[in-house]
Amino acid sequence: MNNNLISELLCTRISHDLAGSIGAVANAVELLEEGDMEFLDDIKSILKTSSQNLSNRMKFFRLAFGLKNTNLDDTNMVKTITKNYLSTIGNKDFPLALAWNITNIKNNRAAMLMTMIAADMLIRGGTINLYDNDKKIIAEFSKTLKISTEKLDKLKTILEDGGDITDATTTPLLVLQSDNSKLYVNETNDTVLLIKETE
């Protein structure tokens, strides 16, 4: 896959993930301009929530997809940014939680991307467990959770058979595969594991 196509897919994915909150901010500003103070509390709430979501997602995208910077070596910061990103996807009834047990800072970016892939598959919240060892990084979640079988099957098809990866939702996977490392999905009776083998 050429770099131009990867860039197009990345721009599409990020634009899509920011569009909702940007639209909410625009609508709130429009209501302010109309001068109807009856909705002032609602407008404040919309602006606060949407601006926080935009900030959390932008910080995550910068680390996950941007040029490498020293912040990627700060595990506590990476963990916090990743948890905050998940808070923009889940909701109060079905929150997404993260159990971060990544011990090698070199795995931080890959762990962020694996979190993103796992979060895409969880429909009604749940916990994503991240951990690594000398040879692998693993993102794990329970099969008792509500999972998009369509997205899981698509992921397995891509990893096992080299299926179509020109859908913008696969962007995290493209970045993970950019170093030609092996990725695969392992399912047990209880869990789904996305595994990246490291050097």
Image (cartoon, rainbow, N blue to C red):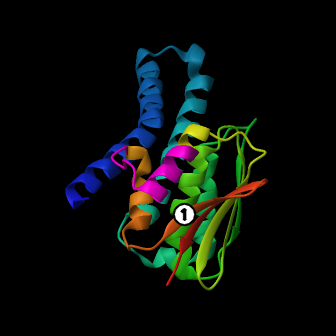
| Helix, strand or loop for the magenta stretch, by majority | helix
Which residue ends up furthest to the front in the rendered image? 161
Name the residue tied to disc 1: 184
Residue at image coords 59%, 70%? 77
Q: Is residue 61 visible?
A: no
Q: Range of the magenta residues?
A: 152-167
Horizontally, residue 34 falls left or right of residue 98, namely left
Q: Which residue is at 33% across, 44% downward? A: 12
Closest to the observer, 192 or 71: 192
Q: Is residue 187 visible?
A: yes
The residue at 51%/13% (across/down) is 36
Q: Residues within 10 Å of mark 1 (few under 14, many from 20)?
A: some
Amino acid carrying label 1: it is Tyr
Q: Quadrant of the N terminus?
A: bottom left
Look at the image and say whether residue 87 sits in the magenta stretch.
no
Whole-percent x and y of residue 47? 53, 34
Query: Which quadrant of the view contains residue 40?
Result: top right
Return the x and y of residue 111 as percentages of the image width and height.
56, 67
The secondary structure type at the circle numbered 1 is strand
